[in-house]
Amino acid sequence: MKRYAGQICALFLGLLVVSVTFLEQEASARIGGSRSIGSRGTRTYSRPASPYTQTTPSRTPTSPAAPSPFQQPAFSGGGFFRGMMGGIAGGILGGMLFRSLGFGGGMAGGYGGPGLFDIILLAGIGYLIYRMVRGRRLAQTPSSPFGGSAQPDYEQSQQAYAPGAAAFGQPAADAAAGLGYIRQMDGSFDENRFKDAVMDLFFKVQGAWMNRELSPVAAILTDEMRGIIQEDVERLIRDQQINRLENIAVRSVEISEAWQESGQDYITALIYANLLDYTTDEAGQVLSGSKTDPVKFEEYWTFTRPVGNNPWRLSAIQQA
C-alpha cells in the first residue's frame, strides 16, 4: 500500500489544481469574469450597501453581512497565481513520482511513502486552494463582500469616512450624506446626470470588452482596473475566443454609496441589466453561454475622481 501512497497523493493534488483552473475559466464570461474586481478605497473590504434597504418596499430589505475571516481579496489573481501554483504542484508531483520510481534516495528497497515535508506541503497547498475556491464562490453570492485576508476589524469599520457621514450600518443616510459632501466641492454635480453618465460608461466598457480593445475606454478606467481587465482580454485573444454581449438593456441604475476620502470622491451604483452573454471562437462557433437566453444580473460599479468637478473613472466591479 505504501508503494502507491505517493501516486495517490500526487493524483489528488493534480485534481485540485485542475479544479481550480477549471473554475477560473468557467467564471470568465462578461467583463470582469462575473467576479468582483478592483478597489473602493478604504471600503474595498466591505459589502456595498443596498440602495433598496430603506427606499424600495417591494424589495426584500438587506443588511450588511458581518465579514468572514476566510474571505478572499476581490482583486484578480491572474496568471501569476496559476503559474505559481502550477510550479509548486509540479515540483511536488515530480518529486513524489521520481521517488516512487526509485530515484529519490528514500528507504532501502524503494519508496517509503510520502515524507513529513510532502504531507505539510500538500496540506498547505490544499488549504490555499480551498480558500481560493471558496472565496470565488462567495464572490458570486449576495453575501459575498470584497473580502480579503487583510480584513479590517468589523467594529473599526463602523466609522465615517467624511466628517459627519453615516456609518456602514446606515446605507441610505450614508449615500445622502456622501452626496451632500460631493456637492459642497462640486456645485454642478447632479445625481440624475451622474446616473445617466454611469449608463453611458457601462455600455462603453462592455463594448470595449467585447471588441477586446480597451484603448477607447482607457480614460474612464483606473490603472488598476485597466490592468485587471487587460489581462482577461489577453487571455481571450490567446485562446482565440470572443465574449459576445448583445441586446444589452439597463433596467435601473441606483446610487448605493457615496463618500470622500484622501482627496477622492467615490460613488457606488447598483446596475440592474440583462443581455445575451455567450463566448465563441473566432469562426463564430458558440463555446459557452446562449445566443437566445438573456442573462439578468446586478452589479455594483464604483467610480472615483479627485474631489471637485473632475472626470469619473471606474475603480471596481462587485457582484450583487
Image (spheres, rainbow, N blue to C red):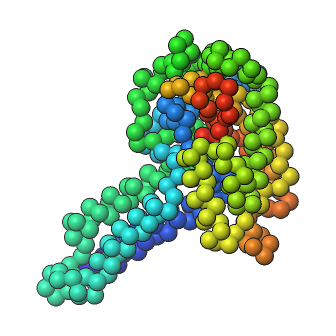
- Residue at image position (75%, 73%) is 282
Does residue 62 appear anywhere in the picture? Answer: no
Q: Pick the residue in front: 261 or 150.
A: 261
* As drawn, 89 above or below 219: below
User: Can you give x and y, in whole percent of width and height, for residue 262 in the image?
Assistant: 50, 26
User: Can you give x and y, in whole percent of width and height, for residue 147 in the image?
Assistant: 49, 40
Residue 149, quarter of picture = top left
Q: Quadrant of the C terminus?
A: top right
From this viewpoint, which residue is outermost toward the left?
A: 108
Q: Quadrant of the N terminus?
A: bottom left
- Residue at image position (51%, 21%) is 161
User: Can you give x and y, in whole percent of width and height, for residue 273 in the image?
Assistant: 78, 43
- Residue at image position (37%, 74%) is 90
251 lies left or right of 261: right
* As drawn, 88 above or below 200: below
* As drawn, 104 above or below 261: below
Residue 202, quarter of picture = top right
Does residue 261 appear anywhere in the picture? Answer: yes
Total tally of numbered discs in the picture:
0
Q: Pick the residue in front: 246 or 201.
A: 201
162 lies left or right of 245: left
- Residue at image position (56%, 23%) is 260
User: Can you give x and y, in whole percent of width and height, for residue 160 in the image?
Assistant: 51, 18
149 lies left or right of 204: left
